[in-house]
Image (tube, helix red, strand yellow):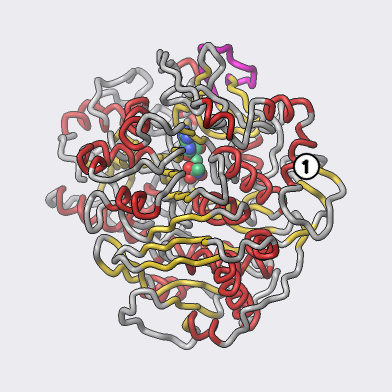
Amino acid sequence: MSTTHPSADGEHTHTSIEDDVVDPAHIDNLSHETRRFAPSPTFADAAFAKADMYEDAESDRLNFWSRQAERLSWTKRWDDILDWSNPPVARWFTGGELNVAVNCLDRHIDNGLGDRVAIFFEGEPGDTRSITYTQLHAEVCQAANALEALGITAEDRVAIYLPMIPEAVVAMLACARIGAVHSVVFGGFSADALASRINDAGAKLVITADGGFRRGKELPLKPIIDEAVQSTPSVENVLVVKRTGGEVSFNDIDIWWHEALAEQPAAHQAQSFDSEHPLFILYTSGTTGKPKGIFHTTGGYLTQAAFTHAAVFDLKAETDVYWCTADVGWITGHSYVVYGPLANGATQLMYEGTPDTPHKGRWWELIEKYGVTIFYTAPTALRTFMKWGDEIVAAHDLSSLRLLGSVGEPINPEAWMWYREVIGGNKAPIVDTWWQTETGAIMISPLPGVTATKPGSAMRALPGIAVDVVDASGDTTPNGTGGYLVLTKPWPSMARGIWGDPHRFVDTYWQRYEKQGYYFAGDGANRDLDGDIWLLGRVDDVMNVSGHRISTAEVESALVSHPRVAEAAVVGAHDDITGQGIVAFVILRGQSKEDSTTIGEELRKHVVHEIGGIAKPRHIMIVEELPKTRSGKIMRRLLLDVAEHRALGDVTTLADPTVVQLIADGMTNNDED
Ligand code: 7RM
């Protein structure tokens, strides 16, 4: 069934993914990479994680995780490490009780580390703050008190829509402290996207800002909230952080954050919550138009976030300055800006703006200025810097860097080598970390003091994690071939479900290998002859644009909500910088023969309005027809061939084989940037 215009009742129908699922036989770009990079003996000797950690975890996985949980501070010890009696919903550290915010703040202060800097903040305009653990604790306590004064309890959800400023961390920890579930929505999402997430979670409070600074300009957020809350009956109040000082309209439900906090004491008696108390919901795109509210709980999540942050990044909390460039609106920001680093008492840099403001060397300038030692970013950013040229990097002293991380998409060997040589000065180990919103924390990655890495490979599962690469029937594929990536045993930070939709949780991740009890990740992977894993990207209709997950169906849905669009099909076409770029094929309604550039531009704006800037199509192609199978399914593989300017694939199953050729002939190479 193809994507059609919404019917009168507003229901959308969506393209089936069946004819797009990659046959493992086609997943065969086996790398012939032979380079290996072992850590220096000095790095290896001093490493947090040593080789014996693998055997240790292998011999008794549950006790391994139990020991990791002991790194946290619990007010009540757990009865059982894992309850897997009701799959696929796991319960970890059952009966245990803890408070996440206490683990991230109070216990460090109790250990005499209150004066350690938790966050060096650098705003895009150049304003700075350094916030110690004692100061962060005081602010979180005030915020927790303020939330309670607004009637927020451990039964409620709070939506957070903020720029990358310390208040985002404070807001998240304040929710965690009182047991309220936060739902952070990335600042790049539109009012509609925000409203649907607020409604899905039934959030009672929204925490936002007047705006943030981006690309040298004020980016207003308040008007977006004002529009969103027109259609969110559950929202009782909006707390507004003053960041830019720009003009905002204030309504009767709005309260200034600084005023609400000023009224509150900087102390707060934290209560402990059950290990399985929900901590947050984070929406992520799936194969339909409706984003999934992935939800995580407390004890298992924090255990794995903290453990992986220590082991994968080899954190030396006393001396390291850590920087993860992810926004808190994504899972990487949750686990590796907020919960992992703070649980470990790390000192980190937080930067508000874009890498090219006011100049293209801003990131490298920051690394030099703060003496960053551990740096975690995405391949799309690295490829952008490669394009800008090495001179920009060379103008800065990056010798403080001792470890580099990559996340969000496969890193191509060229970018990996550039990262190693130009950024890491040929000495810092690189950890390519594979994981997902659903896994909550890193699953596949080198251990930097142990693994001899290969450029482009995430290598193998971390200690305590069980992965496999299987064929369609769930059988392990031999080394030297590829298939689907699965996780074969439960892990502490696994999602506990999709908010309000338990069936979808089962259908999406667990149905496919129900017999084996495997989690289906939705990624293709190769295992080389040594058994090391090479991730190949999604095997479903989820695109990965600059490391952001966007579903083709979601963009199609946005397109068909425009009155002029009859039908739309979207593919993620290869892009040298962003990994994939969004290319849409659109059939218009009615006969009017307007300029396709004008309508294309209008539709791109419409998608931005419906979903947000991250989903803006790179190219919109107006077509007369879409290639379909006889059963009416759109043949995306062919559209992808067209979008990537390739020779057309097999068209024999097409209802009308001439259609694609017509589209291909009309596809000009005028992609927008
Ligand atoms: C952490 C994050 C998850 C999807 C995942 C993959 C892709 C992420 C890597 C990667 C190859 C990596 N969460 N992905 N990391 N692919 N190598 N190191 O990105 O939920 O937003 O996305 O991202 O396709 O399924 S996410």
Residue range corresponding to the magenta coloring: 471-484
314 in magenta: no
Point 53% across, 60% down: residue = 118
Residue 328 location, x and y as percent?
Answer: 48, 57
Q: Which residue is mark 1?
A: 66
Answer whether residue 166 is visible to the viewer in this image: yes
Residue 256 location, x and y as percent?
Answer: 47, 83
Amino acid on which disc 1 is placed: Ser
Judge by depth and name the residue closer to the eye, 115 or 268.
115
Judge by depth and name the residue closer to the eye, 582 or 211.
211
Judge by depth and name the residue closer to the eye, 207 or 465.
465
Circle 1 SS class: helix
Answer whether residue 549 is visible to the viewer in this image: no
In the picture, which quadrant includes the N terminus?
A: top left
| Rendered position, 120 above or below 510 | below
Mark 1: C-beta under 8 Å from nearest atom of ligand 1 = no
Residue 424 location, x and y as percent?
Answer: 37, 35
